[in-house]
Amino acid sequence: MTKISYTLSKNFRKDTLLLLEKIIVMVDDYERKGYRMTLRQLFYQLVSHDILPNDQKKYKKLSTIIKDARMAGLIDWDVIEDRIRIPTMPANLRIFLIW
């Protein structure tokens, strides 16, 4: 999927933009190699490169930053995946597909 902006331009703080630059380079590199990262893998890559401290609050903040960056069209929706979450289909759509 391409990068699509679903919201008006978000005013990211300067430190967040600097972090996003590093994140985008990292996830794009993984994507070029044919991999998709989870949020946890991305977090630990950032920790191992001394970009973020290993802290629960930073993990939660990273989740928010990724969500906002996706909505703003800065990060492709498909480069970070949730391998545990099972997508659900609305009941009315399931009925339609059965017919």
Image (cartoon, rainbow, N blue to C red):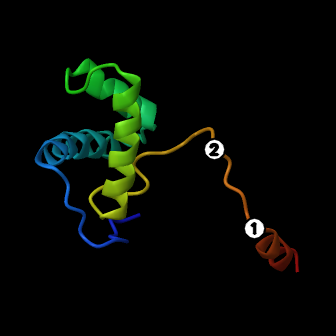
For label 2, count other residues whose C-alpha is less than 10 Å away and answer few (under 14), some (14-19) or many (20+): few
Residue type, numbered disc 1: Pro
- Tag 2's secondary structure? loop
Q: Residue at x 82, y 79 (%)?
A: 96
Q: What residue does disc 1 label?
A: 90
Total numbered badges shown on the rendered structure = 2
Where is residue 55, by image quadrant? top left
Task: Name the quadrant of the C terminus.
Answer: bottom right
Q: Is residue 79 left or right of residue 15?
A: right
Q: Rounded to the nearest whole Å, what is the CA distance between mark 1 and mark 2?
A: 15 Å
Q: Position of residue 58 (x, y in %)?
A: 33, 30
Residue 68 against residue 83 in the figure, above or below: below
Q: Residue at x 38, y 29 (%)?
A: 57
Q: Position of residue 22 (x, y in %)?
A: 18, 39
Residue 51, disc = none
Q: Position of residue 24 (x, y in %)?
A: 24, 46
Residue 39 against residue 32 in the figure, above or below: above
User: Quick one: label 1 or label 2, which is nearer the N terminus?
Assistant: 2
Where is residue 30, by image quadrant? top left
For label 1, count other residues whose C-alpha is less than 10 Å away and answer few (under 14), some (14-19) or many (20+): few
Q: What residue does disc 2 label?
A: 85
Residue type, numbered disc 2: Arg
Residue sitting nearer the eye, 50 or 98: 50
Residue 21 against residue 10 in the figure, above or below: above
Q: Residue at x 20, y 20 (%)?
A: 50
Q: Residue at x 20, y 27 (%)?
A: 51
